[in-house]
Amino acid sequence: MSRPRIVIVGAGFAGYRTARELSRMSRGKADITLLNPTDYFLYLPLLPQVAAGILEPRRVTVSLSGTLPHVRLVLGEADSIDLDARTVHYTGPEGEPGTLEYDRLVLAAGSVNKLLPIPGVAEHAHGFRGLPEALYLRDHVTRQVELAAAAEDREKCAARCTFVVVGAGYTGTEVAAHGQLFTDSQVRRHPLREGMRPRWMLLDVAPRVLPEMDERLSETADRVLRERGVDVRMGTSVKEATHDGVLLTDGEFVETRTLVWCVGVRPDPLAQSLGLPLERGRLLVDPHLQVPGRPEVFACGDAAAVPDLEQPGQYTPMTAQHAWRQGRLCARNVAASLGVGERKAYRHRDMGFVVDLGGVKAAANPLGVPLAGPVAGAVTRGYHLAAMPGNRVRVAADWLLDAVLPRQAVQLGLVRSWSVPLDTSSPELARVPNGASAGRPPAEPAPGRPGGDHPTPGPVKRTDPPADRPDTPAEGDR
């Protein structure tokens, strides 16, 4: 009898955990294939520290082939899934098409940047979902500080020193907190930059910072941000974005060259392409993470709408905690469907949240106990070290070096602005001017297309769904 073929689409928190657990449980009795655009698992919660120059990029990545030795890794992006033929069609990193056959399918495609119908945002803002975007932001912020220092016009200097972050959830709050420390360090240690005042703004239509968290933790984060000089504006967002700045919903125009879009995420468009029942773009599954009517198809993480048995009628939110736990259960239920063990329904218990605010500051409520200050900072970093599936010693070493040595603020120029468009179905991949992913052969450039850092980005591979309603979005993968 041939070995069952298991295909896992996506290597985020849910997909990686599913692959790791299945590899351990199968003991070579199943062919496990992991389809992912990159050869690494990205530990997304530490991405703001990459943008702030604390951690080197490879510290937040974990090799898939190095940690999943019994899993076949296929590099590529899933284009479509034929449920009747049980095949996954994908495009490889060099543009070559491919097909994977399966007996069991796990859809863990994750999420992408959430778009809102605001003029100019898609053209002038950048998201924060992948490593290329973090590397771009680090270079961009460093460049703006250097250009501001060389500017003779005070207004131009102030505009380049103004950084606007939209979205006061986990990601946006951490980006603003770390960003303020990063730019302050560049100014403080340079005698010729005396008098420069980097200004970070954090905007959100929500009534408070971190609206999804306990009010005490929200107040802690708000206080830390304001003490550092971050301009926190709740109930305010962007009405229009231009090359010279942003028009706020309260009528004020803020001159800036930096707009960071952290308003949340939406499910990967692949889920919508299946033609199956959805819940706000997420694939509906039963408590066992199986698609009704398709017992061979499982889904977990941000791509799946999993019933919350602790709150009947609700679905589990798009967070890393749920994705990680669902990945483990998904592996067990896939094995059960093949006759190994018994399947179980997904239940969870709130273990609390942690938000790193940079330096020794953080906000945390492990097991429901609210913490702030250095104690919260220690708990937060301890949590991340325990949660990471690799690179713990290297991450701890970078934290130690950051505590005793000044940060290196240099532009590497590895990622240009057109390589990380906001409107993309694959934020983990840098783009080239014709719209292909990095690593694929570019097409011939169009006649007369300008060079430099701002060519027109090409189309994305899949057609994204319409933008969600402009309400307060939920943070994903955190």
Image (cartoon, rainbow, N blue to C red):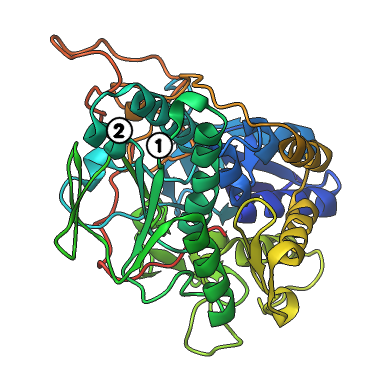
Q: Mark 2: which secondary structure?
A: helix
Determine the residue positioned at 29% across, 24% down.
Answer: 151
Which is closer to the viewer, label 2 or label 1? Answer: 1
In this picture, is 157 found above or below 234? above
Determine the residue positioned at 14% across, 61% down.
Answer: 251
Rendered image quadrant of residue 311? bottom right
Report how far apart the C-alphas of labels 2 and 1 lie in the structure: 8 Å
Q: Earlier in the sequence, mark 2 or mark 1?
A: 2
Q: Nearer the viewer, residue 198 or 174?
A: 198
Determine the residue positioned at 55% across, 54% down.
Answer: 108
Q: Which residue is mark 1?
A: 196
Classed neighbour count for the residue bearing mark 1: other residues with Cα under 10 Å, few (<14), some (14–19), many (≥20): some
Q: Can residue 76 be seen by looking at this rendering?
A: no
Q: Position of residue 295 (x, y in %)?
A: 57, 66
In this picture, is 60 found above or below 382? above
Q: Nearer the viewer, residue 246 or 336?
A: 246
Rendered image quadrant of residue 382? bottom right
Q: Nearer the viewer, residue 339 or 224?
A: 224
Q: Nearer the viewer, residue 430 or 125?
A: 125
The amino acid beneath tag 2 is Cys
Q: Position of residue 333 (x, y in %)?
A: 70, 66
Assess whether mark 1 and mark 2 are in contact (beta carbons under 8 angstroms).
yes
Q: Can residue 311 be seen by looking at this rendering?
A: yes
In this picture, is 20 found above or below 65? below
Q: Which residue is mark 2?
A: 157
Q: Mark 1: which secondary structure?
A: loop
Q: Which residue extends farthest bottom?
A: 312
In this picture, is 362 found above or below 5? below
Q: Position of residue 377 (x, y in %)?
A: 72, 60
